[in-house]
Amino acid sequence: MKLQQLRFLLAVVDSGLSFTAAAERLFTSQPGVSKQIKLLEDELGAQLFSRKGRSLTAITPAGEQVVEHARRVMYHVESIKSQTAEHRDEERVLSIATTHTQARYVLPDIIARFRDQYPEVKLNLHQGTSEQIAELIQRDEIDFAMASGSDEHFEDLVRVPCFQWDRIVLVPVEHELAKLDSKLTLEHLAQFPLVTYVFSFGRESSLTQAFNVCNLKPDVVFTARDADVIKTYVRMGMGVGIVASMAFDSEQEADLVALDASGLFPRSTTWIGFKKNALIQPHMEEFIHLVSPQSIDLDFQGVTGSGADAVAHIDFSDWPLPVLD
Amino acid sequence: MKLQQLRFLLAVVDSGLSFTAAAERLFTSQPGVSKQIKLLEDELGAQLFSRKGRSLTAITPAGEQVVEHARRVMYHVESIKSQTAEHRDEERVLSIATTHTQARYVLPDIIARFRDQYPEVKLNLHQGTSEQIAELIQRDEIDFAMASGSDEHFEDLVRVPCFQWDRIVLVPVEHELAKLDSKLTLEHLAQFPLVTYVFSFGRESSLTQAFNVCNLKPDVVFTARDADVIKTYVRMGMGVGIVASMAFDSEQEADLVALDASGLFPRSTTWIGFKKNALIQPHMEEFIHLVSPQSIDLDFQGVTGSGADAVAHIDFSDWPLPVLD
DNA sequence: GCCGCTTACGCCATTCGTAAGGATC
DNA sequence: GATCCTTACGAATGGCGTAAGCGGC
């Protein structure tokens, strides 16, 4: 048995039972993968995959067991590598994929504090849609995903909640709503064209959903990936902006007025997530603690247990989370 | 990194930091071990061993960490092998090293029941002294050690207690002590030449210790490895025999008389033990449960945890143990 | 006919054993 | 000088990539 064979096996499983995809992911040839898997099956004397003709159809029960152990093997192998890499001072990297809102308004502070503690760690900040973030983390190209909402793309991740936030409504100072003296309602908003974030593909956004339950039809005239763009169009008078509360600084941007919308839309939770069997190095754990101070009691390394497995089943749902604004 | 390198590393550590001994244990050449360790150190970029000149003196902190993970890697690798071996019906073996008393008087019943459940498993019963048993289990040549007493040789093992037993005194029917109508005392025994088990090397046996605390000097004229030999010499009138209670069947051996000695010597505990990181396959676990019914609640496999580690730290000390006689 | 896994084959890297070298006691 | 680890070198093995084969859809 070779480590390479176990690595291949896991890649095949994680590529949706495709030798071809696994080979691409591992930057090697497809026949090589095929051969090593076959050798492994021969050595173990058990079929790991069910085949129909020459295509893989499923993983066998024996294969499942092997995969479980193989994951742990690779986890400990990675631990050996990362621990010794840390022992000398080799290049360490922290790669995060997140949305614009977090990258622009939340992470700067956190990253500044992180740099104080780990000035030698290189930071890699990827920005993208939920789909892109999910893709990156699934392909192991980043260490952490950070986003809001419970997208179906992230179901396999261990997600540690960080904080909550509400939306605000932005209008130009001269806008009708800026002079509103009663409390802002959805009915008010439904009367104006709206400018807000692009909706995540597939499911109904929590924003349109909020309107729907009141039998209102929001008139979303423009959507953008980030609040800066939205604000630009709000300034142009294109519509009323709805953005995350932390995306607006009333002192810096006196030409806009923010109206509290915390009661109108469900509160969002921003979390940081990683793959279940991910290896969490000390500097990565520190980053989690920085974005989620509540997680300070969790030990993500668990030299004794199998790393992230220890936290994979922790119920975060009743954590008291800070609300940002 | 290669599995072979981790295997070599562990062998070196388990051979007392000797490349030569590790090579012998692994049936390979010493330069091969040397080279692979060096390659591993190069790849990891860390010294795993401290060297004085060309000899190993100690394992470095980094090495310790690597060893810990390497053990787990090998554990899961072995799990993969054994689980798939079990999936097809390959030859499975159960190797036990124990003392004569257990092998001759205790294990027959247990092994009979074991064979009922796992008729296809080959059994390997090694018999020897404490030293020999310890040697066998340290060299991974057997699965289980089974013995009594808390020999220093077995300190590294996970030991599951099975049952307790007392000693009996054996004399020919015509012997003076056979006619004793009062309770047997150490003073009585001190008046006769004694025949008993060879003392384990190094420390004072619990038997001589019992005499010592009463300021008596036992006259041990003959020691043997097993009760059958002792009985032979008792029959010859060579002395009074002191053996384990289960080593005598009053119906089968009417020419000898057994006197209860349970109050005179400390009660002994027989345990079954295995190395901390040993892989416990289901048939092995069943064997533990057979020799130690109290252990039925323990799960020795722990697919989730790291196998035997889960039980390595369980405190058995307050278990109620059956007393055999 | 296209896609995807398997087989065949040749090249290169790695491994392992033997033999020789160096360091320490 | 004995012991133990390291280095050197040649034979054998194994891994990997290219190219061809084959089974489903």
Image: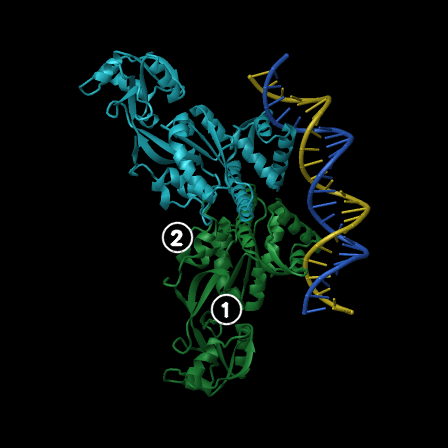
Chain colours: A green, B cyan, C yellow, D blue
Tell me where residue A51 sits by quadrant. bottom right
**Three-letter residue code for mark 2:** Asp
Q: Nearer the viewer, residue B181 or A84?
A: B181
Q: Does A4 sit above or below residue A13?
A: above
Disc 1 secondary structure class? loop
Q: How many marks?
A: 2
Q: Are marks 1 and 2 on the same chain?
A: yes
**Three-letter residue code for mark 1:** Asp
Tell me where residue A137 sits by quadrant. bottom right
Disc 2 secondary structure class? helix
Viewer-side label of 1, 2: 1
Q: In this rendering, does residue A68 appear at all?
A: yes
- Per the rendering, the mark at residue A151 is 1
Q: Does B101 sit above or below residue A92?
A: above
Q: Is residue A88 left or right of residue A29?
A: left
Q: Residue A225 in the image: state x and y as whole percent.
A: 56, 73
- Per the rendering, the mark at residue A81 is none
Circle 2 Cα neighbour tier, 10 Å, few/some/many (<14 / 14–19 / ≥20): few
Q: In this rendering, does residue B198 appear at all?
A: no
Q: Quadrant of the C terminus of chain A?
A: bottom left
Farthest bottom residue in view: A191
- Per the rendering, the mark at residue A297 is 2
What chain letter is assigned to the residue under label 1? A
